Image (spheres, rainbow, N blue to C red):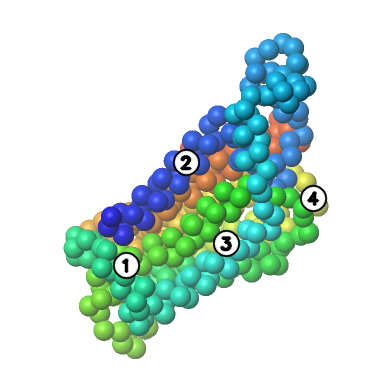
Amino acid sequence: MDAVDALRAFFLFAACMIFSVSLPASLRSRFIPYGARATSTAPVESETSASTPTPKSTSASPSRTSAVTRALDYVATFRVPHSYFTQFYVISVLSSIFWALQLLSHGRVFQAFATRIRAEHMQEAISINQVMLCCGLMLIHGVRRLNECLSFSKPSSSKMWFVHWFAGIGFYLAVTVAVWIEGTGTILTHELSLDDFNLTTRFSGRTLLSIPIFILASGIQHDCHHYLFSLKKYTLPTHPMFSRIVCPHYTAECIIYLSLALLAAPEGETVNKTLLSALVFVAVNLGVSASTTRKWYKEKFGEAAVLGKWNMIPLVY
């Protein structure tokens, strides 16, 4: 398969898998929550008990439990420490540096990708300026998030399902390729010079729109993370950013990837389709998590805690 199409398919397939797991209550309750949200303040009932007036199913002996339920429970026990989130951004930073070196030297790994890209994607390549800006912004994003994980982390025994961990690693390995892959044709034919690093002469209307959006969203997300870190454990956020949105830091993350998709759009296109696919993954993944967070806030602090608030995207979700 063409490398560009394979990347897009990966993001969309992963998004569909996350969405599918989030729909059945039996899967959602076992595999979606992590951290504090993995511990509900309300009693969790099975789908059978929810439809039956008697509580017999909640106290059923193991012999009565179906093989499928036992299998799901067993798979759900495979968890890793929630602190492993930091590894996502270590991988993001290292991967960004690795690809920068590969692109500059036309290294073997880059050449292996280039040989697997169809001519139509080569011809619609984004400019060298777009490649450099997107790669640079992705590195900045990874460094900031890594610094936040190291600076704002608190000792915790919370865990997440191991598939969350694998999905995060896969995403950051893939997205650090997505930011440049549609510029492969340009990279192969362009001879790098010092003039390419003089970005003051290369700003366009697209960059003047996208970069401020990226900076603003990054600042908002950093402020949200710093505020959440300052809270006492399991305290309801009262910061203005949380007044109308349950998870504004998730909103900011989506805007960050939207800005990259706009910045890396090929000539004549509105967005970069590969990065748009990555945005779909981010939106679905964080959207499911935002829904879980809303439920957790409601159970712990009451209906008033989330009344009138959007989960993640104002006026939409």
Give residue 139's position: percent from left, percent from top: 49, 71
Identify residue for label 3: 88
**3D distance between C-alphas at marks 3 and 2:** 20 Å
Q: Residue lying furthest front in this view?
A: 63
Identify residue for label 4: 233
Disc marking residue 17: 2
Pointer 3 with pointer 2, Cβ within 8 A: no
| Closer to us: 288 or 312 | 288
Q: Is residue 3 visible?
A: yes
**3D distance between C-alphas at marks 4 and 2:** 32 Å
Disc marking residue 113: 1
Q: Secondary structure at mark 1?
A: helix
Mark toward the start of the polypeptide (1 vs 2): 2
Mark toward the start of the polypeptide (4 vs 2): 2
**3D distance between C-alphas at marks 3 and 4:** 24 Å
Give residue 192's position: percent from left, percent from top: 30, 84
Label 3, residues with CA under 10 Å away: few <14, some 14-19, many ≥20: many
